Image (tube, rainbow, N blue to C red):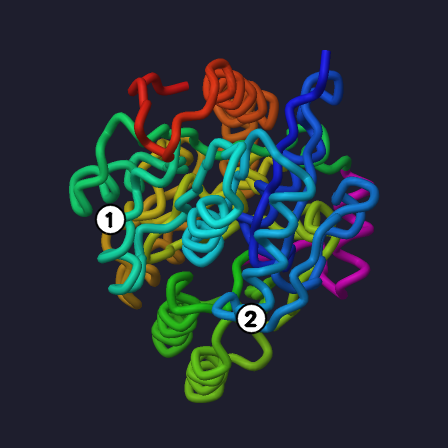
Amino acid sequence: MPKTRVLYLISSLAQGGAERHLVDLARSLDGERWLPEICVRSARVHYKTDVPAGQPRYRLDSPVWASPAAFSRLVGTIRSFRPHIVHAYMNDANLWARLAVRAAGHPRPRVVTSVHLDDMPAAYRWLEPRLARWSDRIIAHSVSIERFLVGALGVPASLVAMIPNGVDEQQFRPPTEDERQRARAARGFAADQLIALMPARIASQKNQDLVVEGLGALKAAGELPASFRLLLAGRVSSGSYERRVRAAIARHRLADEVRFLGAVSEMRDLYAAADVVLMPSQTEASPIAALEALACGLPVLISAAANTDDVVRPGEHGWQIGAASASTIADGLRTILRSAPAERRRMGNAGRQHVLQKFTRQRVIGDFERLYAELTADPPAATAGQRGTGVRP
């Protein structure tokens, strides 16, 4: 039986949750049924050890999406590969996939677009409901994204499929005691230090500046132990925001307590060195980094806005704050500082079991394979969105 061809489209494979999701999906589909290929706008690849061999197969080699040459290459890619499904990730790729599929002509592949955040810029808020029917399905990766698309933007509910994220529980697992000691020693951490980790790109959405302000308040009150360390692991998404975070660190004299690590390839080793993970974001869609941390046996401090998919059950797998602010984050950090190591281990162990029950990579793969099979069961309509059964995986 011929394989179903799936073309994945994304800006790049830089470090990020959406990029990790795409890589995991492309390398985990049943090879007997599916032929995935990856197309990127630029050639940045962070997940070198996880990307399937030979990928990304197609590169548009453009610094921006709004390039006639890049668009022409994308249309040519669709015509030459002749995918049954084009699956795009994030706003820009979603827009250009819809346009390019229409320009490529027949046979028209199914179009799947993925929305990972609800902080969509104004231009895309205007475009999304107008172009929604050019998608056969729009993937919402969290309950909050589904509410945003259907409730706030007016996208037809029949086009939206809600598929929460998941992680590879074999790759992300609790460290042995030897692994933990080696990971901490490699970074110069003593056994009794409390290491907090923020595995997130440096961007205002992630609230690193508020975390630093919260730490500053604790230090000024004499409540921050000298042994505490915060690790910021992620690529810089905004240079101006990074400067704001660094200015706050200098203002509160936290240079010894806060360390920038940049983009980290071996995240499991970093999780092994940490005691807790902080994710007090403005918004998230079933955050993959939080799921990785839980799978590794780490408790997570999360904001309510980032926890719409029951990723962390407060008191069981970690701690939840309300609206993120320097004050609420400081309160959450106080609770962490007062928690006993045994209590943090109990939460981390419970968090891993929670991931195994609800957020595995295999569940995600199964959800998408069922969706792909549904979309390719009938001949394509003349234009995307003319069918839309409303069936959700």
Q: How many numbered marks, from 0 up?
A: 2
Q: Is residue 268 above or below residue 30?
A: below
Q: Residues within 10 Å of mark 1 (few under 14, many from 20)?
A: few
Tell me: 179 left or right of 117. Answer: right
Q: Is residue 347 above or below residue 74?
A: above
Q: Is residue 130 above or below residue 254?
A: above
Which residue in the structure is indicated by mark 2?
226
Which residue in the structure is indicated by mark 1?
130
Residue 194 seen in this snapshot: no
Give the secondary structure at mark 2.
loop
State the residue at coordinates (51%, 27%): 359
Q: Is residue 106 above or below residue 99?
A: above
Which numbered disc flags the more N-terminal residue, 1 or 2? Answer: 1
- Taking the magenta stretch, the answer to whether it contains residue 171 is no
Instruction: Pick whichever, 32 or 341, lies toward us.
Output: 32
| Amino acid type at image mark 2 | Ala
The segment highlighted magenta reads: 177-198
Q: Position of residue 228 (x, y in %)?
A: 55, 64
Looking at the image, the residue that sits furthest to the front is 106
Give the quarter of the image for residue 63.
bottom right
Mark 1 and mark 2: Cα distance apart in space? 54 Å
The circle on residue 12 is: none
Tell me: 298 left or right of 207. Answer: right
State the residue at coordinates (28%, 59%): 324
Query: In which quadrant of the rendered image does the C terminus lie?
Result: top left
Give the secondary structure at mark 1.
helix
Instruction: Pick whichever, 41 or 117, lies toward us.
Output: 41
